[in-house]
Amino acid sequence: DPQQVEQTTIEDVRIAISDWQFNWGPENTWEKQFNDRLRAQQECNSTFRSVDMFFGICNDHLQSGREILGDLRKITASYCRNARVMKDKFLQIYDMLTIILSEVKFFEVKLDEYAPSIPTLRFSSVCYYERA
């Protein structure tokens, strides 16, 4: 039936999160990891191409994280009669939400800091809005 949409499961989202994470270690080390990777790209050559590629990867990662958040939202719409199963589902979603939001927010802040859509000073044009 074409009207039927494939339902996303908690297991699907958990695997998607595992595949999506950058695995840069504890959250308090992400700033250093980010700066080290940015510095390495800046030292690659004198053009901004490698830096733009780095910020493009960060932006793609951010967008993928937002898609996973959307998948989590879809899971919350499903109905369950068993209170114990519902509680377990809620706790799993909460844990996954915490993981995703931390990383998504980190990259939102970094992209806004280094590649803002309306910049006063910009290191990259990845998120720059230009009129056609």
Image: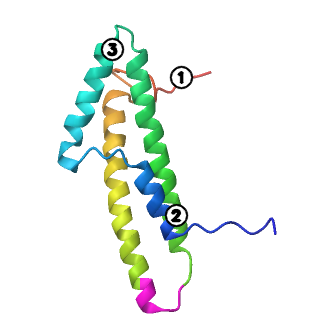
From the viewer's perspective, is 81 left or right of 109?
A: right
Q: CA distance from mark 2 to mark 1?
A: 37 Å
Q: Is residue 82 magenta?
A: yes
The stretch of residues the image draws in magenta is 80-86
Which label sits on residue 12? 2
* Residue 96 image point, x, y percent: 38, 64
Q: Which secondary structure, mark 2? A: helix
* Residue 57 image point, x, y percent: 44, 33
User: In front: mark 3 or mark 1?
Assistant: 3
Q: Which secondary structure, mark 3? A: helix
User: In front: mark 2 or mark 1?
Assistant: 2
Specify the amino acid type for callout 1: Glu
Residue 31 in sight in this render: yes
* Residue 40 image point, x, y percent: 28, 21
Specify the amino acid type for callout 3: Cys
Residue 118 in sight in this render: no
Residue nearest the viewer, comparing 16 with 63: 16
Instruction: Characterize the local packing of mark 3: few (<14), some (14-19) or many (20 or more) Cα atoms within 10 angstroms.
Output: few
Q: Name which quarter of the figure residue 43 lies in.
A: top left
| Residue linked to disc 3 | 44
Instruction: Characterize the local packing of mark 1: few (<14), some (14-19) or many (20 or more) Cα atoms within 10 angstroms.
Output: few
